[in-house]
């Protein structure tokens, strides 16, 4: 087993090599606007998972996935040539779910803001259900009743 620092360095290098190779060498028309977001390498440096996003609709995502799958051999040989590791890791491409998750979170936050605004609107001009100061205070004694 190798240390995780080496795996991280190799993952960063693979991410850069794959992104540059996609930009400069791969001329597949199916390949849309692809962004390599992250790369993870297993501890034994044998497998690399490359996360990517595609700008566009579902049709462009499937076309880009097919283009990446067909360019896998060229990308792997380029990774092996530029990294110089003994065993070139196999590449697996996975569509990154971070943008969809972020969009979902933004939608939920917008709904929460709208609900808060509605509550603020409803509460405007209203008073407390009980006294303004709900804490009990000690009873105040009259000095005249203590003298008698």
Image (cartoon, helix red, strand yellow):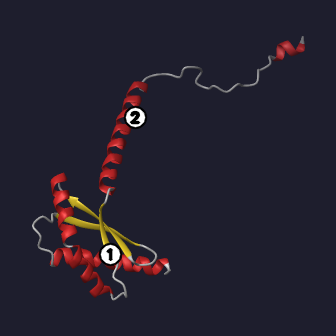
Frontmost of labels 2 and 1 is 1
Question: Residue under circle 1?
Answer: 90
Packing grade of label 1 (10 A; few <14, some 14-19, many >=20) is some
Q: Is residue 127 left or right of residue 133?
A: left
Relative side of 84 to 5, left or right: left
Q: Which residue is mark 2?
A: 116
Q: Is residue 57 visible?
A: no
The quarter holding residue 117 reads top left
| Quadrant in the picture for residue 22 | bottom left
Please tell me which residue is depicted at 80% across the width and 16% down the height of the picture: 142
Is tag 2's residue or tag 1's residue first in the polypeptide sequence?
Answer: 1
Question: Marks 2 and 1, Cα distance to the nearest angstrom?
Answer: 49 Å
Q: Name the spot of residue 52 as percent of width and height, x first.
A: 27, 64
Vertical comparison of 96 with 26: above or below = above
Residue nearer the viewer, 123 or 69: 69
Q: Residue at x 32, y 77 (%)?
A: 14
Q: Position of residue 7 (x, y in %)?
A: 43, 78
Q: Which residue is found at the position 36% from the left and 84% from the top?
A: 87
Element type at marker 1?
strand
Q: Residues within 10 Å of mark 2 (few under 14, many from 20)?
A: few
On screen, residue 127 above or below 80:
above
């Amino acid at each position: 087993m190798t240390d995780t620092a080496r795996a991280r360095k190799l993952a960063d290098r693979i991410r850069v090599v794959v992104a540059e190779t996609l930009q400069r060498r791969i001329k597949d028309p199916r390949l849309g606007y692809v962004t390599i977001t992250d790369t993870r390498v297993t501890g034994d440096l044998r497998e690399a998972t490359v996360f990517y996003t595609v700008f566009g609709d579902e049709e462009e995502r499937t076309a880009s996935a097919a283009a990446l799958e067909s360019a896998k051999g060229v990308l792997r040989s380029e990774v092996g040539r530029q990294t110089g590791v003994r065993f070139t890791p196999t590449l697996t491409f996975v569509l990154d779910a971070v943008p969809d998750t972020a969009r979902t979170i933004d939608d939920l936050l917008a709904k929460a803001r709208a609900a808060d605004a509605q509550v603020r609107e409803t509460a405007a001009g209203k008073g407390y259900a009980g006294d303004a100061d709900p804490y009990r205070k000690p009873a105040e004694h009259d000095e005249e009743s203590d003298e008698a």
